[in-house]
């Protein structure tokens, strides 16, 4: 009986019986691809958690835009998210410089204080008459099904521009990622490039929050690139793997969230990405746990005197 | 003046929620502030971020296993899951192609996602909702939450006092600490357990995510103001107390989330210290640099 329900739901999903399913799926895949791309540069530079801070920092922008405009207009909310997310990312950059401030603490401070501002605004909104039906909570854990066709195409355009921009600056970005001093010596303006990367991060986060939510967007920036590192040793391949697996996680997340009532898209997507990560961690050709131990055993067997006979 | 005093006194006469909220938030904030100093010095601030997020799946797991939400069971579940996550983070970070910050990001987001999904499906009837998880409920602290805080925080503080030497030495110089025979691994996991327990105790009152602010911000502020461990702890606790009082009254005045207001006030205090701290503030540093430059130029001209 229950199984029939799920089969029925799966059929609905794959035949795109409802339009919103196609857009939810598309938006989730887009999140995976964009975050996988931007996240790779962050993870390789050791800035993984700056994405976490930026994600949490978008909340006051979303809530603030609602307070100012008084209506839930998606463009206004996302513009607010972009402003406060970008401000959060830049603040981490500013506070991390100089003595007496630890970079890890700077990330934690921006993350929690910006989120606190967002919570204050959210609580204030809920006290308003219009606030009850504002539905801003869906920004916390994501609700891909609420994305309209217009918003979806808007996100696609912005995402495409972002990917193109990164493709244009690929060489200097790659150089800075592996050897910042060398990049500087080559005459690359690393400061500007760094700010550009933070801006790209903010845009990626804003594209993503409707589908994954502000709290878990960090996962989509960190997990697929970390998976890619177990699958290849080349930057271009790590990026490719990260985008592909990010997109797949998005699709799986959208599917799971459609299948089971009450499961939000964001957490489902994150768990799909974690699943891929665990598989790569065990069996990946680059330092996978099982792969390594098999390789070691083979080497021992060929070296040991018994193995030669 | 009289009006001000009246305004300050009035909330205490509106029922017992005011002193309950004040007592709870002071205990939680002071506990977090003291532990936060040690985490800050060990560059483990972001582990607080992870452990606070992981408290949620811990509590949910405890509820799934036992079917109850009694205080000891909640604590046990959170401690177990918190330690599991801390060990997973360390194991992952020991692999050559994963940095420790990525390890933190991978583990806690995955655990948190599991917690959120369980909360919205299997354990929907447990009385922990995402609302309380995010906003906390300082103006209506339940008996259970208060009991937790009143028992846990003094115990944690007492442990900090007892093991103060060990904590202090190992926070400043890990290698020296292990050389003179301090069990640094045990101290490390003990500290993590203390953070988890405090986060769980504060969970219902201030929300899972705002607990992070109570742990990280006071210690970071104190580091701008103090040069010795004991004064740093004092500043950290002072930061916690001031932001609790001011935040509570701001929340009452504007009718918003008390936990959120406390965090915002704490952030403002940090910013003030960042700019105006007498020795390490940015403005003093700027003036000092300018003075030095003038001093350098005058003899030659």
Image: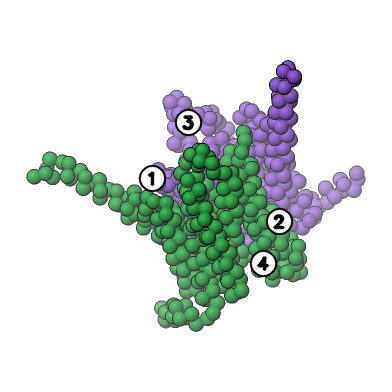
Chain colours: A green, B purple
For mark 2, what is the residue? A120
* Residue depth check, mark 3 versus mark 1: number of the one nearer the observer: 1
Instruction: Determine the secondary structure under disc 2.
Output: helix
Give whichever of discs 3 and 1 has the lower sequence position. Answer: 1
Evaluate if marks 1 and 4 touch, with contact meaning CB atoms under 8 Å apart: no
Quadrant location of the N terminus of chain B?
top right
Residue at image mark 4? A75
Residue depicted at x 76% and y 69%: A129
Residues packed near mark 2 inside 10 Å, few (<14), some (14 to 19) or many (20 plus):
many
- Tell me how far mark 2 sits from mark 1, CA to CA: 40 Å
Compared to residue B33, the image places residue B140 above or below, namely below
Give neighbour class at mark 1: few <14, some 14-19, many 20+ (Cα, 10 Å): some
Disc 3 from disc 2: Cα separation: 40 Å
- Distance of mark 3 from mark 1, alpha carbons? 21 Å
User: Based on the displayed image, in which of its 4 quarters is residue A276 positioned?
Assistant: bottom left
Numbered disc 3: secondary structure: helix
**Do discs 4 and 2 share a chain?**
yes
Q: Which mark is residue B95?
A: 1
Secondary element at tag 4: helix
């Amino acid at each position: 009986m229950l199984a029939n329900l799920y089969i029925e739901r799966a059929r609905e999903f794959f035949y795109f019986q409802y339009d919103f399913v196609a857009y939810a799926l598309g938006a989730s895949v887009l999140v995976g691809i964009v975050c996988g791309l931007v996240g790779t540069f962050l993870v390789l530079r050791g800035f993984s958690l700056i994405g976490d801070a930026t994600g949490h920092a978008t909340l006051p922008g979303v809530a603030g835009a609602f307070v100012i405009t008084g209506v839930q207009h998606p463009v206004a909310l996302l513009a607010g998210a972009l402003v406060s997310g970008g401000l959060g990312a830049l603040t981490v950059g500013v506070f991390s410089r100089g003595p007496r401030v630890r970079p890890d603490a700077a990330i934690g401070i921006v993350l929690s204080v910006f989120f606190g501002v967002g919570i204050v605004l959210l609580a204030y909104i809920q006290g308003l008459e219009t606030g009850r039906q504002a539905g801003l909570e869906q920004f916390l854990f994501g609700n891909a099904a609420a994305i309209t066709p217009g918003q979806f195409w808007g996100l696609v355009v912005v995402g495409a521009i972002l990917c193109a921009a990164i493709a244009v600056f690929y060489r200097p970005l790659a150089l800075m990622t592996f050897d910042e001093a060398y990049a500087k010596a080559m005459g690359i303006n690393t400061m500007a490039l760094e700010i550009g990367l933070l801006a790209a991060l903010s845009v990626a986060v804003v594209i993503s929050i409707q589908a994954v939510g502000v709290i878990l967007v960090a996962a989509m920036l960190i997990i697929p690139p970390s998976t890619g590192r177990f699958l290849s040793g080349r930057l271009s391949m790590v990026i490719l793997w990260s985008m592909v697996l990010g997109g797949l996680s998005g699709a799986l997340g959208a599917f799971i969230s459609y299948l089971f009532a009450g499961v939000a898209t964001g957490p489902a997507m994150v768990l799909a990405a974690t699943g891929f990560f665990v598989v790569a961690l065990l069996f990946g050709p680059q330092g996978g746990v099982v792969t390594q131990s098999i390789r070691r055993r083979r080497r021992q067997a060929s070296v040991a005197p018994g193995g030669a006979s | 003046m009289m009006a001000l005093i009246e305004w300050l006194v009035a909330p205490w006469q509106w029922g017992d929620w005011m002193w309950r909220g004040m007592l709870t938030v002071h205990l939680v904030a002071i506990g977090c502030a003291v532990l936060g100093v040690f985490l800050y010095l060990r560059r483990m601030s972001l582990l607080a971020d992870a452990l606070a997020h992981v408290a949620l799946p811990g509590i949910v797991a405890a509820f799934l296993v036992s079917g109850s939400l009694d205080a000891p069971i909640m604590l046990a579940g959170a401690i177990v899951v918190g330690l599991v996550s801390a060990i997973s983070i360390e194991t992952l970070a020991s692999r050559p192609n994963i940095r420790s910050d990525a390890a933190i990001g991978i583990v806690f987001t995955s655990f948190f996602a599991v917690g959120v999904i369980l909360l919205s499906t299997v354990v929907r009837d447990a009385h922990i909702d995402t609302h309380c998880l995010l906003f906390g409920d300082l103006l209506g602290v339940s008996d259970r939450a208060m009991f937790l805080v009143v028992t846990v925080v003094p115990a944690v503080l007492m442990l900090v006092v007892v093991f103060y030497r060990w904590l202090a030495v190992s926070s400043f110089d890990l290698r020296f600490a292990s050389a003179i025979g301090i069990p640094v691994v045990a101290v490390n996991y003990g500290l993590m357990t203390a953070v988890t327990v405090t986060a769980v105790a504060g969970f219902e009152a201030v929300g899972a995510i705002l607990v992070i602010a109570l742990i990280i911000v006071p210690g970071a502020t104190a580091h701008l103001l103090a040069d010795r461990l004991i004064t740093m702890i004092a500043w950290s606790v002072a930061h916690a107390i001031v932001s609790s009082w001011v935040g509570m009254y701001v929340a009452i005045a504007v009718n918003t989330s008390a936990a959120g207001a406390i965090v915002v006030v704490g952030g403002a205090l940090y910013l003030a210290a960042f700019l105006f701290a007498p020795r390490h503030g940015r403005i003093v540093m700027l003036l000092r640099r300018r003075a030095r430059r003038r001093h350098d130029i005058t003899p030659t001209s």
